[in-house]
Amino acid sequence: MLRLEKRPQPSAFWSWLTPLIAVVVTMIAGGLLFGALGKPPIEAIRTIFWEPIFGEFSFYYRPQLLVKGAPLVLIAIGLSLGFRAGIWNIGAEGQYIIGAICGAAVGLAFYPTESWVIFPLMVLAGALGGWAWAMIPALLKVRFGTNEILVSLMLVYVAEQLLAAMALGPLKNPEGFGFPGSRNLQQYPSAHNAEIITGSGMHWGVVAALVAVIFAYILLNRHILGYHIRLTGQAPRAARFAGVRPRLLILFCLGASGALAGLAGMFEVSGPTGQISIDFNVGYGFTAIIVAFLGRLHPVGIMLAGLLMALTYIGGEIAQSNLGLPAAAIQLFQGMLLFFLLAVDVLTNYRVWLTSTEAA
Amino acid sequence: MFLYAASGNAHKKAEVWRRNLRNDNILSAEWGNSRDTRRSRTNPRLRLRDVIAGKGQYVTENLLTINGLTKAYPGVVANDTVSFEIGVGEVHALLGENGAGKSTLVKMIYGLVKPDSGTMTLKGALFAPSEPRVARVAGVAMVFQHFSLFDALNVAENVALGMENPPKQGDLATRIRDVSETYGLPLDPYRMVGDLSAGERQRVEIIRCLLQDPKLLIMDEPTSVLTPQEVEILFATLRKLTSEGVAILYISHKLEEIRALCDHATILRLGKNVGTCIPRDTSAREMAEMMVGSAFEAPARAGRDLGEVALDVTGLSLNSPGEFGTALKNIHFTVQEGEILGIGGVAGNGQDELLGALSGELQSDAEAIKLKGEPIGRMGPTARREMGLLSAPEERLGHAAAPDMSLIENALLTGAQRENLMNRGFLKWADTRSFAKKIIEEFDVRTPGPDNAARSLSGGNLQKFVIGREVLQRPEVLVVNQPTWGVDAAAAASIRQALLDLAAGGTAVICISQDLDELMEISDRFCALNEGRLSDIRPAQGLSVDEIGLMMGGAHGMEVAHV
């Protein structure tokens, strides 16, 4: 039978290998699942992981990788700061929506004036919107000790209602023949988050995600604040002893993750999506939680994990259209990835021994 | 020694055991001498009872025979062919430094750990408990050093939780009262455990064991939470138990206690049984040297000149942040430069809160704490460190150090400001690494290198690191809580020496500790915490144990004790 023994310290080797193992195990289990659905398993896996990068239409899919990866990475970087400190912002999806609403609202307020200031103002508004939405659970936690998981999660649904109200009310396109949804920002040059190099998929959100990765890396590894974040997550009492003020840290972590999620929403609404609509959000805020953990809460890891997760999104869509896989199967597939990662994680902290079957 | 196989025949075994004692107890003066002092073996009541019970047992029979027990963990042999015996009604001490293998051995007896090889025989039958429940059924009970009690439940409910088939609350309460009266351990079954003192909590654990009618009671460091008066009461209870034939395996490194209580001692060093002795006939120093394997030096104190008042605490009152913590009530004291103030007291009487109030983790009225005349009560830990007030809390893992972080990162934990390890918030890792290395070298921390996680160090080594980290920052005032708790004798001596050297250099040192020997050894003045209040401060020299005990609050809730 298997026997687990705690390692004296977590293994660095395994902590980097486990995500790869998790991906491989997910492929196998996913293959079995697709097989059980009556689809060719190897073909399905190949479609998800291979087709978008090296397949026939990769010229179209490759830029999509950046487009889908950027919001995931941007949000996940923010979440990882809080997660490292043991502060669980589960409501990034809501902050993403509010960021998008605020960013779009500022842009639409200027319509049809053209000016270079408009886009930077929208960026600012998006970040502020996400930040403010995240301050609600933060202040409630600091002031009344509420659970930030529940509050931030519930605020997602509030944000969704707000999104619908905006799409149907104040932000509705006056020239939209009564259809819900705002003007399309892609057709408003001053507010359009256009590709920096045409055809590359590289928009300002991708740049922001890269900058966030670099900043988070420096913060966590080279700055006392990052050290205090890690210390608080690993040993809260030691952190207080070291002089960390937990309340300030909660405000910072939730605020930073909210601002980054808001930014992601703003870049999304002004770029790839183009307009505020009822079904604007597609769950990036939740998927980013998987991305953060898959990337070991490490900025570089998160960047890789974000790209991988974007790959499953794109590959999943191809598999849906080419093989007729149900959309739920793809979501299940992504869920499995986190599930297996957490399971395989045991190897980081424990040695596994095979022993004879006698009772220990 | 002890390498014969256990035989089933009680008579033969007793004979072998006797012979064994005669030949192998290198430290026992003579078997004949010590026999008189062995109450249980000459107790006629026991002999009678056993004969009546028709067991045909000899009074000198072994209760538990441990034969060649070996248990290896990766990289360390925790127990290496350990053999010894415990007789019926005997108090047997298990001595050894931290990491000598005492807990592993006891866990094997209690069924928590399965030995790699070797056998145990309990009352002549092979004894190989697969889990604690089996051990309990066989008559082995254990009182752990750390209590497993629920603060929010009352005594009877806590006791019921540990039982296989708990009786009704009322019946159980009656039984608890019976047992507690019989053994002189007064305890109200309906009191909440959260409101009990450490000594009373221990009584809950002991009574829980006694209700199982044990043959062998294992006690792990039972006196570390007791005042001297409470220790006496505990010993009276244990003596009453042994007179009824219960054997006690007593783990401690307090040698004087062992000399006062135990019939036999087995000494472990690095997992091996390095000898047995009759504690009464052996000096504490001899036993200590057997434990350590060599002679070690006691800290030397030089005469010191006291300077100005470094820390002035006046009327410090503070509510505890935790529900079951102890509030500090109107505490006054001053410490001068070059002075060591020893603060004694039983655990849970406000020590953690006092350290927190001084370190800055808990904040009080600004004027309640003054460092060199500056009010600092409202300042946080960082500001206090910058001013020269450093501290080292009791709990090494999770409070003084972050378990999963490297020693480098842990050096940064308190050293960031005074050691100038950052520049506008950006960390100087190279300087931090050399600071960590300096601590490791100067304080003889045994570790492969500064990149190792704090939790990979043994308790003693980590404690040396934690104390070294503060000492090397040249504090004006240093507050330490339990500086040598769970630390082996040699490391403890070097930590005490470091504190003495620091004081000699003009630092004011406040040493909070439950180890009275330690406090008497290093402190100039002594006081005690009792339920959040600080006693009068007296010069340490010339204080008697009785006086100290009274300062610590005498015997908590034991006024009605009659044994």
Image (cartoon, coloured by chain):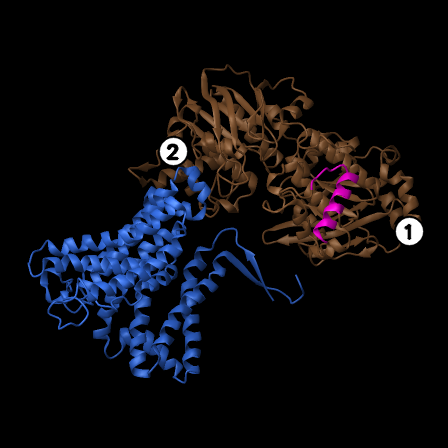
Chain colours: A blue, B brown
Element type at marker 1?
loop
Query: Which numbered tag is attached to residue B483?
Result: none
Observer-nearest residue: A95 or B281?
A95
Is B432 placed left or right of B123 in the picture?
left
The percent coordinates of residue B369 (x first, y second) are 44, 24
Q: On screen, B210 above or below A334?
A: above
The percent coordinates of residue A130 (x first, y second) are 26, 54
The range drawn in magenta is B168-188
Observer-nearest residue: A277 or B106?
A277
Q: Residue at x 34, y 76 (%)?
A: A327
Q: Give yes or no for residue A265 being in the magenta stretch.
A: no
For the residue marked with disc 2, what is the amino acid?
Thr
Q: Quadrant of the N terminus of chain B?
A: top right
Observer-nearest residue: A332 or A48?
A332
Sequence-earlier tag: 2 or 1: 1
Element type at marker 2?
helix
User: In which quarter of the view is residue A174 placed?
Assistant: bottom left
For the residue marked with disc 1, what is the amino acid?
Ala
Residue underneath mark 2: B382
Distance, label 2 to label 1, CA atoms, is 68 Å
Residue underneath mark 1: B53
Q: Quadrant of the C terminus of chain B?
A: top right
